[in-house]
């Protein structure tokens, strides 16, 4: 009789546990699947370098911008 009264709470708890376990297993599979690709790409790709070639602003030019 007591189980029938609490059936909604039991169903919600089971649904939450099922959702959490599905999310955790999917996240673990995605992490394992991506690790070799990231490792290979990092080993063969050259480091990206950004060069900025410009002159610095003078105090008068900085004042005119604001």
Image: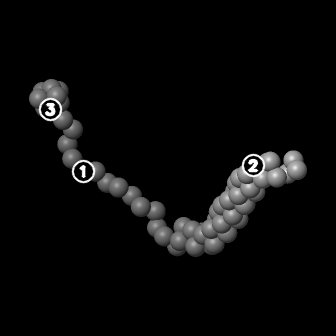
Element assignment for label 1 = loop
Q: Are marks 1 and 3 in contact (CB under 8 Å)?
A: no
Q: Earlier in the sequence, mark 1 or mark 3?
A: 1
Residue 65, disc: 3
At horizontal 28% and vertical 51% (from top left) the residue drawn is 52
Q: Is residue 44 visible?
A: yes
Residue 41's place in the image compared with 15, above or below, is below
Q: Is residue 17 visible?
A: no
Residue 31, x across and y down, in percent: 64, 65
Q: Nearer the viewer, residue 59 or 22?
A: 22
At horizontal 35% and vertical 55% (from top left) the residue drawn is 50
| In this picture, residue 49 sits left or right of residue 33 | left
Residue 9, disc: 2
| In this picture, residue 13 sits left or right of residue 23 | right
Label 2 or label 1, whichever lies nearer to me, is 2
Residue 27, x across and y down, in percent: 65, 63
At horizontal 78% and vertical 53% (from top left) the residue drawn is 7
| In this picture, residue 8 sits left or right of residue 34 | right
Q: Which residue is mark 1?
A: 53
Residue 40, x across and y down, in percent: 58, 73
Local crowd size for mark 3, using a 10 Å CA cut-off: few (<14), some (14–19), many (≥20): few
Q: Earlier in the sequence, mark 3 or mark 2?
A: 2
Element assignment for label 2 = helix
The image's colour scheme reads one colour
Q: CA distance from mark 2 to mark 1?
A: 65 Å
């Amino acid at each position: 009789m007591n189980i029938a009264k609490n059936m909604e709470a039991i169903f919600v708890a089971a649904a939450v546990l099922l959702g959490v376990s599905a999310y955790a297993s999917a996240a673990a599979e995605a992490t394992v699947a991506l690790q070799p690709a990231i490792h290979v790409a990092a080993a063969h790709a050259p480091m990206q370098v950004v060069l900025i070639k410009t002159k610095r602003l003078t105090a008068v030019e900085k004042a005119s911008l604001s």
